[in-house]
Amino acid sequence: MAVAPSLYVHVPFCASRCAYCDFYSSTPSGPALESAAGRWLRALRTHVEFLASRFGRDGFETIYIGGGTPSWLPGDTLAEALWLIGRAARSGGREPTEWSLEANPEDVDERLIDTLLEAGVTRLSVGAQSLEEEARRLSARRGTAAETLGRLEVIAARWPGRWSVDLMFGLPGQSAEGLAEDARTVIGLGAGHVSLYELTLEDGTPLSRAAASGTVSLPDDDQRADHYEAARSRLLEAGFRRYEVSNWALDGQECAHNLRYWNLDDWLAIGPSGVGNVASGPGAFRRIANAADLDAYCSDPSGSASESTVDGKEAAFECLMMALRTSRGLSLGSFERRFGMKAMDAFGPLHDRFPGLVRLEGDAWIATDRGLDTLNEPLVDALSSIERSWAGRSPQPV
């Protein structure tokens, strides 16, 4: 690899499961957590060494530790995992440009902060979701609103690096006024990045079942729009810029790791259910999906993974879809160099067909603010176009 890849680390443990979550995780505690986390750590050590032997020891450009809840790991296990990851990251002779870790606010104390700083973590991503008590209760969020706010204040006082807060809209029991106040609070505490996610009902989750049975009422479309606008207004007033569909940041506070995802740069993944992406030739990517099962992963971290190739029109469409999610948009020149075909030929003139949603700015197609909210319309059209334009063609690099 010419440029060092990034690294995603999946920690599959939580203190409890939120009612809307379908990410791979389990909820052990006490001795059961100690045992499961120890197995996970041993598998991580094996997997890191395997990836180094296969892809080289060039270190990692960025690191993101997610889950699950990484901050739920026992303290000694977390410290050892961070040391292991840091050693691998620095094997190329330099520090990663960004190292993020997700944390539940209720886990954050001075000991955790000291552990992260000693290891070299530079950025915290804190899952608050809501500071409204009823929304937290109906979503089965851990801790009270007051407890969460108190931990956010600890972060503001003690964490010297960059930090982000996750907020959600469209939650049951949530109000536009409450979400506006949540945004004002986290901005006032000094968070330089806010991820603003709309609730998605995933099949099989407790919240999905509750909504289907009528035991929980969800906000309607107009109410969700009011929620979003309330948070959006607060963020804009504070100087935040929407740089991706769900992500807002002050200048210089964007998440470098996630930008590499959206650009389809190389990243590797360790931990059960983690998925890596590695270029495998012009316009093609190798997807490496780790087993979404702790036992299978710990038995054979690399052997239990599955691999597939994404190429041709599928890779080209994914490149467009990911790029249009961001404020940078799709560089038409970069697309042609990557796929050996002009984007205009592959997808047609999207900016002409969707003038209020996609604009042509210099060398790039960029989604407008309204377009970021309604990407499905131009993307469905682009998918139909590339099915026709790519038929019977084997693109060659230019």
Image (tube, grey):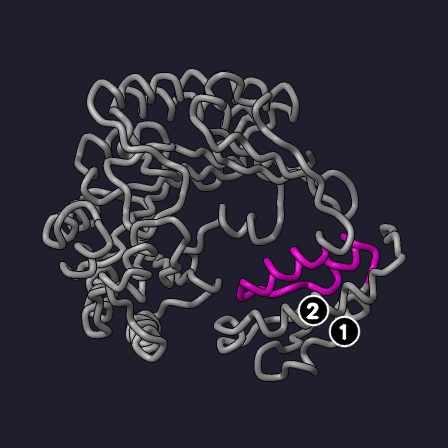
Q: Is residue 164 left or right of residue 279?
A: left
Residue drawn at 36 percent across, 39 percent down = 101
Residue identifier under label 1: 348
> Is residue 360 shown to the viewer in this render?
yes
- Above or below, 196 relative to 101: below
Q: Is residue 106 left or right of residue 102?
A: left
Q: Earlier in the sequence, mark 1 or mark 2?
A: 1
Q: Nearer the viewer, mark 1 or mark 2?
A: 2
**At label 2, which amino acid type do we have?**
Ala
Mark identifier at residue 382? 2
Q: Is residue 22 left or right of residue 52?
A: left
Residue segment shown in magenta: 316-341
Q: Main secondary structure of the magenta part?
A: helix
Check disc 1 and report its element: helix, strand or loop.
loop
**At label 1, which amino acid type do we have?**
Gly
How packed mark 2 is, by other alpha carbons closer than 10 Å (few <14, some 14-19, many 20 or more), is some
